[in-house]
Image: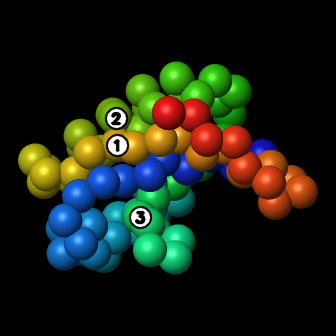
Amino acid sequence: MHWKVKLEGDENTLSTLAGSCSSPQAKVVRDGVDWFLESTDFDVIMDPVEVKTRATEILTSVASGAPVNLGPVYRLHYDNSKTVYR
């Protein structure tokens, strides 16, 4: 199981953030047209509310005040299905 959190913001800001956040603890990646925050910190979490809380902490430390918001939390399952928590 894998978690990721959708990021909402200006395309240029998210692209710049992706260039500066590429470690396993904080990685900004593009998946199709959307941007997501991924982190190995999410791996041990079972609750989507806790994932969002941790994502908030990570984003606060890496975004340096950039106008980026967190969107829904995605839980990716082993069979390639996903659950979206809004």
Q: Residue at x 64, y 24 (%)?
A: 47
Q: Earlier in the sequence, mark 1 or mark 2?
A: 2
Q: Residues within 10 Å of mark 3 (few under 14, many from 20)?
A: many
Q: Is residue 54 above or below residue 18?
A: above
Q: Amino acid at mark 3?
A: Trp
* Residue 43 makes an appearance in the image: yes
Asked where in the image residue 75 lies, by quadrant, the reply is top right
- The secondary structure type at the circle numbered 3 is strand
Q: The residue under label 2 is which amino acid type?
A: Thr
Q: Which mark is residue 56?
A: 2
Residue occupying image coordinates x 52% and y 76%: 32
Distance Cα–Cα, label 3 vs label 2:
15 Å
Packing grade of label 2 (10 A; few <14, some 14-19, many >=20) is some
Q: From the viewer's perspective, is residue 46 above or below residue 83?
A: above
Res. 41 visible in picture = no
Q: How is the image coloured?
A: rainbow
Instruction: Tell me the amino acid under the disc marked 1.
Output: Leu
Q: Nearer the viewer, mark 1 or mark 2?
A: 1
**Residue at the disc numbered 3:** 35
Image position, residue 12 (x, y; %): 18, 75
Q: CA distance from mark 1 to mark 3?
A: 10 Å
